[in-house]
Amino acid sequence: KTAYEIPKRDWSSDVCSSDLPPPPPPPAPAPKVTPSHLFVDALLGGERRVRPANFTEDKFTEYSQGAGLVGFKLGVAQKFDNNWEVAGTIGTGIMFNIPTDVVNESTVFVEGEVNKYFPAWRNLFVGSGASWWDLTRDRTRTFAWPLRFGVQLNHNAKHPIFALGEGRWYLDHATHLGTHYQAWGGVRIHFNN
């Protein structure tokens, strides 16, 4: 007889549930990557600044000068569940110029960052904050207003790497935006545990 022909009350089984093998264990959870608060930036770009008169260099009035910059930053960040991030950084901009008759001074700076991440768009982030630029020289020390963006290059990686772009408007000559700015680009690497 087929199963359709056997009344339900006649169905029986020779197999007990104790004879069945145990169900397989659930898969082990993926190792959790704990976000670290530490990150580093490596950057290349330049600046254009209005510089004060300097009689030792035969510069008798304020003058504008462009220069290349290689930058390095070390930062500590706290990212929140709502995809906002607050960070603090310290860094240096190493100036390079080919002509020898121009100012060739490097800078040290500190910065506060506020960034917003957009996970749906390759973990893009945009941000701003405040910079205190040229801490080691009182002639050119100034506050600056930074803008930044980043796009994650390696998804699901232990150490996220972002393509990074930044620009700053030096505020000691706030009306001279065309001759008083800085921009650079590079990478940001977050170190996760």
Image (spheres, rainbow, N blue to C red):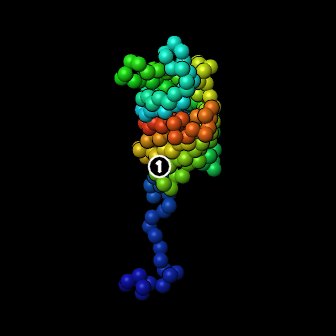
State the residue at coordinates (48%, 37%). Answer: 183
Q: In screen coordinates, is 1 left or right of 27?
A: left
Q: Residues within 10 Å of mark 1 (few under 14, many from 20)?
A: few
Q: Residue 187: x, y in percent? A: 44, 36
Q: Residue 61: x, y in percent? A: 55, 24
Q: Identify whether 111 is placed above or below 117.
A: above
State the residue at coordinates (42%, 85%). Answer: 4
Q: Quadrant of residue 62?
A: top right
State the residue at coordinates (46%, 40%). Answer: 164
Q: In screen coordinates, is 15 left or right of 131?
A: left
> Could you say which is closer to the camera, residue 86 or residue 146?
146
Q: Quadrant of residue 20?
A: bottom left
Q: Which of the image's four quarters has the N terminus?
A: bottom left
> Could you say which is closer to the camera, residue 14 or residue 174?
174
> Could you say which is closer to the camera, residue 148 or residue 34?
148
Q: Residue 7: x, y in percent? A: 48, 84
**Count of picture labels:** 1
The amino acid marked with disc number 1 is Pro
Q: Which residue is mark 1?
A: 27
> Could you say which is closer to the camera, residue 123 or residue 170?
170
State the residue at coordinates (45%, 64%). Answer: 15
Q: SS for tag 1? A: loop
